[in-house]
Image: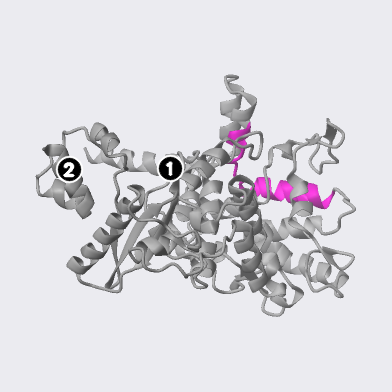
Amino acid sequence: MFCHFFATVLHLGWFCEEALFAGLIPLTIDFSGIKNNLHCEMIMAKLNLIGNSYHVRFGFKGITRRYALKTSNLEDARNEKNKIEDTIYQIKMGRLIVPEDCQDIHYFVFTGGKETDRQAPACLTLQDIWNGYFESIPSESRDSIKTERTHIKHFIAILKNKNIRAINFKDLQEYIKTRLEEDGNRGKTTSTRTIRKEMDTFKGIWNNYALPLKLVSFSFELTFVAKFKHGKESTKAKFQTWEQIENQISRGDLKENEAEFLWDGLFLDLSQIKELLDFVKKSNDSRKWIYPMFLFAAHTGARRSEMLRSEIQDWDFQNKTVSIREKKKDKDKEYTTRDINLSDELALVMRCWIYEIEDSRFVFSENGTPLTKAKVANVFAKKYYFSKRKDQWILREWYFNNTKWSVLRGWHIFRHSLASNLANAGVDPRLIDDILGHQTEEMRKRYQHMFPQKQKAALNLLFQSDIKAS
């Protein structure tokens, strides 16, 4: 008798919601045997209220689709949902036959088996979507999406030629899992932070390109409603002075990679910055741009990419200012700018340097050709690199070889060193934000810290006052 009732409930299409919520079917019953006896699967469509209209989502033949029901009435939406579940049930039971010439089986189900002439959506892969997105960007702006291109290459390599409409939550979670196991920088696996950026790129192209062109049916947020598991982000190195880091390493209980991690958090005081700049100035390096770029970074805190983007017209030596072209503040604009005052030394050095390269548009170039990120990054590159072609480790012609400065990790050290020294000098945090172009509280907390000696003095002053008062 119960089996007859269960079959009736399933046939009417209100098995999962109405029957359970009404208390007609106990939640503790195991339906597996009944399901096998009926030779069918439990069928479930879902309703979503989007704006003022209900949409229905259901899966069939391994692919999930959504359709607008064009109604704001919940009862009408439930009736349409029940019809879809009933249609799927009839197909699975062999009572409704899908015509061989049916082009879009999901629309056939949506219309209750009435519509057979509608063409199935084109099978577009992620590569197709990327090609279209890339072509939609003006040629002069394509250099700005190099990072996006790299991100999408990873998706294509892992998801391959899967139909964009068939990509589901499980596929993207598997992508995340695969990327977490792949090699990253410095002998580590790909970081969680990197994967989050890749997912943001995927989401942006989905919502801003594919969705408006109706290449996908719904926004990224509605298509992938569950929360992805990215794993925990690795902790960034705590900012410390040279002396603090050497003291920790001198204990002798750190592995090589642990020591390298500490140097990632190094910031230089004013005397160390001056010593480093003197070293670079006296090196007589054939790359004449080296010293001007080091001084630019040290005296303004400009990012590497901002320095490479700098044009001669951005420099106003009469008013001693430079306009920094930044791309992180407003993604809808090609770039925004922030103006920074020039120190006397920086103004003098850059005036002489620009005079030498007056025929070039970009401030940092060689023979009229703008410097690349890779070329500039090599100044801080590792001493050895592995050549796949030669299958061996190669000694790099390294700028800081066999010097105390070999512990420096990159151009960013000037940026957080400047912020630290400004904070130590008591400069207003808002002014530091203006100089460095900070946007978030997280960034401010990382940079606006005091030197250990000053912290210690402040605490001693506080507690000495407390002792005297008592």
Residue displayed at 72% across by 58% down = 295
Horizontally, residue 164 falls left or right of residue 58, namely right
Where residue 200 sits: x, y (%)? 51, 56
Left or right: 93, with 342 as reference point: left
Where 268 sits versus 97, above or below?
above
As for residue 270 lying within the magenta part, the answer is yes
Q: Give the residues drawn in magenta, as a range.
A: 260-282
Our reading of the magenta stretch's main secondary structure is helix
Name the amino acid, label 1: Lys
Other-residue count near label 2 (Cα within 10 Å), few / some / many at <14 / 14–19 / ≥20: some
| Residue at x 47%, y 70% (from the top left corner) | 117
The residue at 61%/34% (across/down) is 188
Residue indicated by mark 2:
6
Q: Position of residue 280 (x, y in %)?
A: 79, 49
| Quadrant of the image containing the C terminus | top left
For the residue pair 289 and 130, the one nearer the viewer reads as 130
